[in-house]
Amino acid sequence: MVTAERGRSASEAPGRTDFGTIVIIGGGCYGTYYVRQLLRGQAAGALRWNRLLVVDRDAECAVARAGAELGSNVEIVTAEWREFFVAYLGHATGDSATEADAIVPSPLMPHLMYDWLLQRARDRWPDRSVQSRPLAAAPAVPWSRAGSGDTHYVSFADWLCPVNCIEPRRCPHTRGDRDWTLPASLRAHVEQNRSAGGQLAGPVILHCTHRAYGVGMIDTRDLLAADRIVSELGEEGEAQILVGTVSHCHGALNVLGISARP
């Protein structure tokens, strides 16, 4: 079920198995792994799609070099990631067919989803200051670290997780039930901030969830819903919106600051 409710992610509903376009960010080792896993899932009847795109600035990336092995239904899009998102998501905002699309993020990519929301807000309100702001306090999680550009990284794991972990209900590391999830923690963080007199809004959550064969995805419709939430909050006046691209265990956070109307 798709919802634009503030602080709720549509991806918390059961993951789809039939997709329109699947967009894989990066055509290197991670992208190659994801393509192979998706093709295995397709062969097993676990999921279907109309198009499978791999976005990389290198036309000779690893996925391209493995083209014959991977098959002809894998399309390479040679573009910078941010440039691709501007074009792809700009088209998606007016095309209902993208309701069935999904994005496979790379573990090492910058906070691309937030970057798109930030630029959309700047385009929407050219007469207002729209800037990233530092996270005043981190959510109550075991590990957090400030990164570049006011991005803050958080995790429930203070150990090294395998990149293909699907975050099952029973944690492979602790061997106990996983009783944590970042979307709920971010909601609690915003509530605590506001209870203490803060102005933090949201959270706007882009939840990457496991879909099949070790591949996590974010529904494109969630990103479009996030853009609508930012628009609603900004129309109400000055806003400081917590934006998180997260899985159950790990995430990247930014605060999108929008000034009052002039």
Image: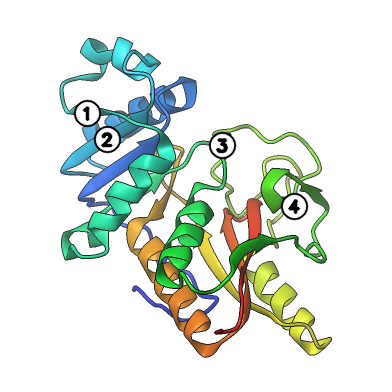
Q: Quadrant of residue 60?
A: top left
Is residue 210 in sight in this rendering? yes
Nearer the observer, 201 or 22 = 201
Q: Residues within 10 Å of mark 2 (few under 14, many from 20)?
A: many
The chosen color scheme is rainbow
Marks 2/3: CA distance? 17 Å
Residue at which label 2 appears: 53
Reading the image, the residue beneath label 3 is 107
The answer to which of marks 2 and 1 sits earlier in the sequence is 2
Q: Which secondary structure, mark 1?
A: strand
Q: CA distance from mark 3 to mark 4?
A: 16 Å
Tell me where residue 23 appears, x and y as whole percent: 32, 41
Judging by the rendered image, the residue that carries numbered circle 4 is: 156
**Residue 54, above or below 185:** above
Find out whether the residues at labels 1 and 4 contact each other: C-beta distance under 8 Å: no
Q: Position of residue 223 (x, y in %)?
A: 40, 61
Instruction: Give the quadrant of residue 36.
Output: top left
Identify residue for label 1.
75
